Image (cartoon, rainbow, N blue to C red):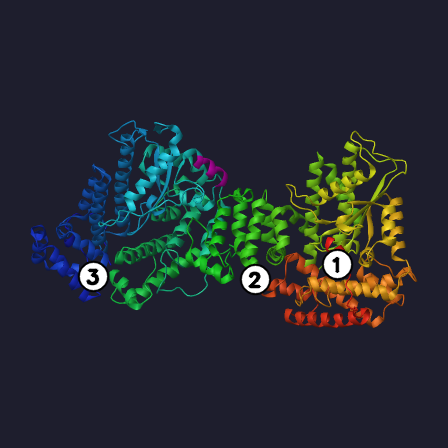
Amino acid sequence: MDVDTGGDAGALIDRIVRPLAPGDRKAAEIGLSRVLERAAGPAGAPFRAALAADPRIRRVLLGVFGNSPHLTDLAMRDPARLARILASDPAAILAELVAAADGLAAPDEAALMTALRHIKQGAALTIALADLGGVWDIVRVTDALTRLADATLGAAVRFCLADAVARGKLILPDPADPAAGSGWVLLGMGKYGAHELNYSSDIDLIVFFDRSRAKLADPDEAVDLFVKLTKRMVKIMQERTVDGYVFRVDLRLRPDPGATPIAMSLDGAFQYYESMGQNWERAALIKARPVAGDLAAGWNFVSEIRPFIWRKYFDYAAIADVHSIKRQIHAHKGHGEIAVHGHNVKLGRGGIREIEFFVQTQQLIAGGRNPNLRGRGTLDMLARLAEEGWIEAVARDELTEAYGFLRNVEHRIQMVADEQSHCLPDDDAGVARIGRMMGFRGARDFAAALRRRLTCVQGHYARLFENAPDLSSGTGNLVFTGDEDDPGTLDALTAMGYERPRDVTAAVRAWHFGRYPATRSTVARERLTELTPSLLTALAATDNAGAAFLAFDRMLAHLPTGVQLFSLLCSHPALLELLALVMGVAPKLADTLGRRPHVFDTLMDPAFFDAVPSAADLERNLARAFAEAATYEDLLDRARIFGQEQIFLVGVRVLTGTLSAVEAGVAYATLAEVVVRRLFDAVEAEFATIHGRVPGGRAAVVALGKLGGRETTAASDLDLMLLYDFDAEAEASDGPRPLAPSQYYIRLTQRLIAALSAPTAQGLLYEVDFRLRPSGNKGPMATRLAAFESYHAGDAWTWEHMALTRARVIAGPADFAARVAAAVRTVLARPRDPDRLRADVVEMREMIATEKGTTDPWDIKQVAGGLVDVEFVAQYLMLRDAARDPGVLDTNTAGALRRLVAHGSLDPAAGEELLAAMHLFQGLTQALRLAADGPFHPADVPRGMLTLLARVGELPDFATLEAHLRDTEQRTAALCRRLLGRSRGRRPAAAAESMNDR
């Protein structure tokens, strides 16, 4: 279709190249009849006369009314206006309307809104008819729409400012020109800033205020006042009334729109762009133009922001970051066939956005060195890029022609119903209508022409970025720019397994806006942008995508810097997979990583998986941490940091299979021993500064339970007991505040418990349980060694001797530790009545089963045939035979079973079966404690955890593991019944009460 560039004047009806063919003849005739009905009175006489005098008008209107309900409605509103438009030069009509807006002096807001909407109606109809009729080309059309926006927005701004003056809120330099010197700056962005508005376009604005220019009655109200002014301006422009609206307003291109007011100070804007501005914002600011308000202040801003937009050197780094926006729009570059039905001519493949990015990225690269490449207009810059040698002339010509064609398609899509849409209809009839409005005879011709342009654009765009890495997820759109959720991105995230995709998009945008310290540098954001699709894919692969993502976000929030980590994860996919595994499969580990992100540094060390730190290594590292503590409280914090980090690192080794269950139990126990030993030394020293020391006093910390047996898990409490002794003549400690020896060691024990278990600013270290001391909760917190020996010689219950089979001294002077160990060994090796022992053990087991029994096979500790049964068998046999052969004693259950077999106390076949069960139970327990402390329900955990459990159980899948677990528990229960027998029904009340106390 030939077009008139607007150079010739004359009536619009005389300059229409070719009337549109009415697609819907019936709708066209109805539309015309309705216009005639509205023109029945005197006011409609000009329209009736024109229609009767010129048959061309009927043909033109039938073509318009048969394709566009929106334009039909505009024509019906004022037939006389329609007649005047057809009989006039469209440029003159537009100039008249712009002048009316520029000179508008409405008495109130309602009158202003009505006047502006009438102006918009007239301009929209004029521009549409000039566009559809081929009178104006795309440059003239978009410029006309932009001039209309400038005029109407200016009127709204002047009214708001004048009203603020009338209310005593603002003092203006020139009341006759309220905007001048007001300090209220409105920047047009995107297509608006470039004079490229589309037919139903929003106007993208960034609103600032200049404190140095704005004269407020109360300067402290600046933010509040300009926010209110901006809200009122938006209402005037976009609120729908019976007369429609003027322009929709979009304020989301401002700095960090989720966290900043809709009007912000220029100082705040400069600070943001200098510290956290992103490359896509640089691209957006290329088109920034002061459009209303204090234009002088606006142009000052545009001048001062140039160093942010335009770098001094060729900025090839920016090309990857800006292109990532487009790579996120499409799952794979070049994937699939370019569509027609439903195709988005703006964002889709080969669309308008690709032409704009083609221009803007090259402007960013070279504009810092070449001011000639800093223009706003897309077509102007295509020409300039060719002149400067950045692109070939054929690229300029093909992209220029395609841009005009696609913008015309976009306008016709929007003219149908005045919707801000860029998508072609999904049905044949709808596509045919757009084709007719483009001047094509049929849908097939139009579709072929459209595909040619889209393919051409895509080819040029792909060649520009052909060496860029793929940032797609392989699932669909991944767009996180701006402040609005992209529907395709939400769909893609849902398909990946994210149950709350809007939470994900909000968090990723927060990363992009630098709200975390780790994302405040430009380089960090560039690396994270590149990493994001791979990260989301890896987290989704854990089958616990939402929880894994939130865990990563928590970690990111605590990172002081991010460049090193993001770069590392980009270049080492295996580490990314490991990170995702932790986040998705082991919530407790993920929580540690969230609070202590720097522990990830250790995982970067190639030697991490080679060896577990020895006790000496841990001692040395903890001593170094304690040496840097400024106070006792600081020392406690450092102990928590150290302990949590080391627990995390052991857990990662279990998670990745580089540490077995037995090795993990030893590693956790070794860590706990080192921490308890070093903290006990610190507590004793701190306590002595106040209370001195007891003459001849010495104390030892005894580990029992899982710690004593070196079977500790990531969630184990520490079962401890403190034994002490002192010179017989000692009556009190020798410090400034002396204490009696018994009170001294009780208080010392309380201090140790607090040092280990009290929450501090750095969180928790260990839960501590002292109920296994003599007499349990009824006895003193600390026990003198002689009292311990006396108690266990006559008053202790059998189950207390069972607990002592796992007693191991972990802190205290070596000589005193040896005395304690000997005392324990004496208790364990004393002769016992085998029948009475068996009866007591069985009674105790049945009492526990009554109170805590379960049929849940995953309650591995308490279920019949579970851990407790195996431990009871080992402890029973050790107590039965230790008097005869002390060599059967071992604090570790598996070690005890081996000794019992080796010393003839346990049948080898039974021992082998119990050891196999113990191996399975300990492995599963270690893995389960990485996820949670509560009950385990297979249906509620991700498949990654089930896979981990199957691997730990050395079986091919979870179903096989569960069946094997049930079978093992049943066989173990039968074996334990055979070894222990059943009770004779006696249940000592005192024993039950004593157990409950403990």
- For image coordinates 39% across by 48% down, the residue present is 386
Q: CA distance from mark 3 to mark 2?
A: 55 Å
Mark 2 burial class by Cα count in 10 Å: few <14, some 14-19, many 20+: many
The residue that disc 1 covers is: 992
Residue for badge 2: 543
Q: Are marks 3 and 2 in contact (CB under 8 Å)?
A: no
Give me the residue at 26% from left, 42% from top: 152
> In the picture provided, is 592 more to the left or to the right than 153?
right
Residue 11 spot, x, y in % from top left: 14, 50
In this orientation, does residue 474 appear?
Answer: no
Compare residues 594 and 734 and report the one nearer the observer. Answer: 734
On screen, residue 160 above or below 862: above
Which residue appears at 56% of the width and 60% of the height?
Answer: 544
The amino acid at mark 1 is Ala
User: In which quadrant is the N terminus drawn?
Assistant: bottom left
- Sequence-earlier tag: 3 or 1: 3
User: Which residues make up the magenta segment?
Assistant: 268-276
Does residue 11 appear to the left or right of 945 in the view shown? left
Mark 1 residue crowding within 10 angstroms, few (<14) / some (14–19) / many (20+): some
- Dots 2, 1 in contact, CB < 8 A: no
Kindly indicate the quadrant of the structure image that contains residue 116. top left
Question: 633 or 509, which is in the foreground?
Answer: 633
Q: Which residue is mark 3?
A: 20
Three-letter residue code for mark 3: Leu
Q: What amino acid is labelled 2 in the image?
A: Asp
Front in this rendered view, residue 333 or 865: 865
SS at badge 1: helix
> What secondary structure predominates along the stretch shown in magenta?
helix
